[in-house]
Image: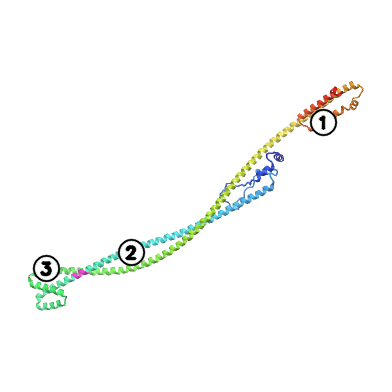
Amino acid sequence: MSQSAGSHLSGSPQLSPSGLLALLGTSQPERMSLSDSMPPTPKSGTPSPGPSPLSLSLLSPGCLEGGDWESREELRLRELEEARARAAQMEKTMRWWSDCTANWREKWSKVRAERNKAREEVRHLRLKLENLGKELTGLKRERQEALNEKEQLGKELARLKLDNREFELMENLLKSKQDGPEFWDQRSAVSVRSSLARQERNRLLWEDASANEDEAAKITALRLRLDESQKVLLKEREDKMSLSRNIEKLEAELSQWKVKYEELNKNKQEVLKQLNILKEIHQDELGRISEDLEDELGARSSMDKKLAELRSEMERLQAENAAEWGKRERLETEKLNLERENKKLRAQIEDLEEVLARKRRQAVSALDTDFRTVQAELFEKNKVSFQGRFGSEAPFQEVLGRDLSIGPLWLPCFASLHQQKESETTQTCVGKHRSHWHCCIIQFLNPNYLL
């Protein structure tokens, strides 16, 4: 059945073997599904399935040579393996780039943490320095206030000392009135050793005291004032001692703060040096990282270009694959349609052959019966005509042998009838030969023809 189908396919003008070769030779069917556009599987995975039985039945030896198909299949498998290898290599490079980016992110996170830590330390040191500067300005202000208070207290102490001397002088004057002129002489000698201004003042006071004895009440008032001033003086002395102690404490604290300030300045210089070193290191690291990132961006751009090219090639291969599969499906459908038509035609041919054989048998049997009847009739008529012409005693065979004009008429008729009976098979041919036979018989039976 398959051989007859192949013969019909090869005999049909629409699908010749050369046409099938031309259709299938330009195509390279590849079994590439949607999974090929996904990330590639390793080489150790399941192999791609072979051609389907329908494609094998389509590419039969009657339609296509086996060597070309095997070479195309090997080429297709080789291209598929190369595409898978390229996809695997691309996947490895993408993984390597992802690992590199993860490492760089980790390094950047460490550098960022160190930078934030250094910034926090610098901020704390700046705050500490600002606090120390504020404390130092406060101490300077307190020191200036203490110095101002000290100057005021010195002035007040000098004034109190002067007042105390005046009160002592007044007391001495009052006592000198009671002791006599010797005491005044001694007091005058003592006052001579004092300053000239004080002597003049004491002299004036003495003159006033001696001149005005009525001022005893004033002297008593001055005594009361002197007592009060002595109390105030004692209190001021105590305040002075406490202030001097506070000043000493403040000076000691000031010296300590100076030492601390110098230490902070030294620490500040060291921190600034470290910050400059860290800035230089950070700038170097940033430059190196920027160069690495530029290299990485260049490599990534090249990889993106390669990926775009591979994707375009994969899309082109998928489009070609889809087109080839469409051609293949169309050829398979055409083959199925042709097989159905061939089956129908074979069934019709078998039916027609049966009908033709039956009609041939009927025609041969009818021709034999007609031939026999006509032969019998002809024999009878010829016999009668011969007896009337040549006499009843002349045999029919002798007349036939003697009349040579009848033999050439019968022999071609019977020879042509026999050949056409063997060669022709249709009813039309039988009818045509029957009419030719009748014409020959009529010409033979025509008495004018015989005459």
Q: Position of residue 366 (x, y in %)?
A: 79, 27
Spot the residue most to the right: 393
- Direction from residue 441 to residue 259 in the image, left or right: left
- Direction from residue 123 to residue 397 in the image, left or right: right
Q: Earlier in the sequence, mark 1 or mark 2?
A: 2
Kindly check if marks 3 and 1 are in contact, taking CB atoms under 8 A apart as contact.
no
Position of 252 relative to 182 (above/below): above
Q: Mark 3 highlights which residue? A: 221
* Alpha-carbon span between mark 1 and mark 2: 146 Å
Estimate how packed mark 3 is, as few (under 14), some (14 to 19) or many (20 or more) residues with alpha carbons within 10 Å.
Answer: few
Q: Position of residue 129 (x, y in %)?
A: 35, 63
Q: Quick one: 58 or 71, which is closer to the camera? A: 71
Q: Amino acid at mark 3?
A: Ala
* Alpha-carbon span between mark 3 and mark 2: 55 Å
* 3 vs 1, front mark: 1
Q: Earlier in the sequence, mark 3 or mark 2?
A: 2
Q: Position of residue 52 (x, y in %)?
A: 64, 45
Residue occupying image coordinates x 39% and y 62%: 122
* 3 vs 2, front mark: 2
Position of 322 relative to 173 (above/below): above
Q: Mark 2 highlights which residue? A: 133
Q: Quick one: 199 or 212, which is closer to the camera? A: 199
Q: Mark 1 highlights which residue? A: 416
Which quarter of the figure is the C terminus placed in?
top right
* Alpha-carbon span between mark 3 and mark 1: 198 Å
Q: Which residues are magenta?
A: 154-159
